[in-house]
Amino acid sequence: MDTTLDRTAARWPRLAAYAAGAWSLLYGGLGLFWALGGPGFPFGAGDVPDARAESLLGDATAAGTAPVIAALGLAGALLSLVLARTRPRPWVRTAALAAAWGAAFTLVALVPDARIMTAVGYAPIFLVGLPFGWPDADYFALGFPWPVRNLLICVLGGLLWAAAALAFQRRTAGACESCGRSADRPATWTSPASAARWGRRAAYTAFVVPFFYSVVRWAWALKIPLFFSEGGIRWLHETGLAWAGAGLATFGALGGVLTLGLTQRWGERWPRWVLGLAGKRVPPAVPITSAALATVVLASAGTEALRIMHWSNPSEWLVNPMAYWPIWAAALGVATFGYYLRRRGRCRRCGLV
């Protein structure tokens, strides 16, 4: 008898394409609304002024860009039908995959920027300090204005397009849509043993990288002008952001430590100090979902760093923690994928191991 999980495993590949198409149609409708003069265009002149210089769409206008958004939304809706309902010729398959994966990457990594990481990273700091009125700032006004909420909507669309592209790619290659395995093609680098080897290297990389950022922010909290001016340090302490930054650095370092769980036994069995759960099996969905979301957040920050960094001047980027965000994002993503391959077990749809 089919279980709920079995039915979900069987249905999500086709549903992903329709969901991506629905998102595209709705966001394209927003583009048409903005093109016709509706308020709320979130890019360019409609964005937060201080963020435009670092945004990919910092020069966008409603008159010039909104019609493009509307057209792309309609094209995405049509493309989703191709992904969901057809098995096209090889050249059409290649073009459809390029468009779908391109949409996913653009919406997840290129359109968003580091504000998503800032908003997510500072949320625990403000929640802890909320009863005490610290930091003295309006978190939602600073961290989640409409342009940032719009970036989160774009990330959601990108994730839907990634799921749709992955399912289509698997189906048209003759593999299981749910897990990607095929009885005709035995696993090589995706085998648990292989994933354990390359996943371990990626996890240790993702463990080390955030400590550079953490050391810098801790230094600022201690009034040490490491890679920063003394005037800037004074401003951070006057506003209270120095300690908020130290808290963010602590969470970053903690995240680096937790990344090791993707390769350690305590990432599969709860350690003894976890009251009530010690020794029990860690549900794979918990670390996979958490690490995958962290990877998505880091991806947008990392691509922004790639855009704005002066790479021709090593004296700038060698000492700038932002320069290492792309490595952090890539390493965490690879480590997460390796953990998934090690722990996915037998597919509920095709039965392959």
Image (spheres, helix red, strand yellow):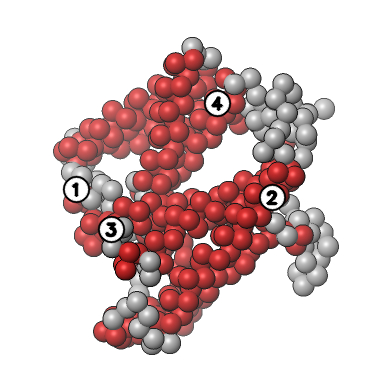
Query: Quadrant location of residue 7?
Result: top right
Sequence-wise first label, 4 or 3:
4
Q: Describe residue 223's horizontal placement relative to residue 193 as left or right.
A: left
Q: What element carries label 1?
A: loop
Q: Which amino acid does label 4 sit on?
A: Gln
Residue at x-position 51% and y-position 30%:
165
Please tell me which residue is depicted at 42% across the width and 40% down the height of the picture: 105
- State which mark lies toward you, 2 or 1: 2
- Name the front one of labels 4 and 3: 3
Mark drawn on residue 197: 2
The residue that appears at 34% across and 46% down in the rendered structure is 111
Which mark identifies residue 169?
Answer: 4
Residue 143 location (% of width, % of height): 37, 63
Contact, CB < 8 Å: mark 2 with mark 4?
Answer: no
Q: Is residue 297 left or right of residue 231?
A: right
Image: 79 above or below 125: above
Mark 3 and mark 2 lie on one chain; the one further toward the N terminus is 2
Q: Mark 1 points at which residue?
A: 59
Q: Which amino acid does label 3 sit on?
A: Ser
